[in-house]
Image (spheres, helix red, strand yellow):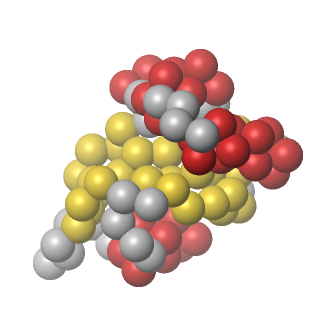
């Protein structure tokens, strides 16, 4: 059974997510931005969601984590919670 670990930053608007992504592309620290901006409780841990399996997250989130390139920052990804910037740390 596949398992992955990911971290994310969750914000309310696409615009805010785009601004944060630009900062990340310029070398900003993911965990620091998550702690400062993420509306998800995981923000306190730098956005770290720990390990999870397919189907434990909403589909749009799962699709990024289990199908897209590892370690790259993906997004903004829209879900019912808002807009995510997602980085898959590893998956098997």
Q: For the point 55% across and 61% down, which residue is it?
A: 74
Instruction: Find the residue positioned furthest to the front.
Output: 26
- The quarter holding residue 24 reads top right
Quadrant location of the C terminus? bottom left
Q: Is residue 33 visible?
A: yes
Note whether residue 10 is visible: no
Quadrant of the snapshot with the N terminus: bottom left
Tell me: 12 left or right of 72: right
Residue drawn at 41 percent across, 80 percent down: 67
- Is 70 positioned to the left or the right of 2 in the image? right
Residue 48, given in percent of the width and then of the height, sits at 36, 38
Relative depth, front residue between 6 and 22? 22
Residue 63 position within the rendered picture, expressed as x and y whole percent measured from the top left: 48, 76
Whether residue 31 sits left or right of residue 36 in the image: it is left
Q: Tell me where residue 80 appears, x and y as whole percent.
A: 70, 57
Front one among 56 and 65:
65
Q: In the displayed structure, does residue 79 sit left or right of residue 33?
A: right
Q: Where 68 falls versus 53 (above or below)?
A: below
């Amino acid at each position: 059974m596949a398992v992955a670990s990911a971290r994310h930053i969750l914000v309310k608007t696409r615009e805010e997510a785009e601004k944060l992504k630009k900062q990340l592309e310029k070398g900003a620290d993911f965990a620091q931005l998550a702690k400062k901006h993420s509306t998800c409780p995981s923000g306190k841990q730098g956005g770290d969601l720990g390990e999870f399996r397919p189907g434990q997250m909403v589909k749009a989130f799962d699709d990024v984590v289990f199908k897209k390139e590892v370690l790259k920052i993906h997004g903004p990804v829209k879900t019912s919670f808002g807009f995510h910037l997602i980085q898959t740390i590893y998956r098997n």
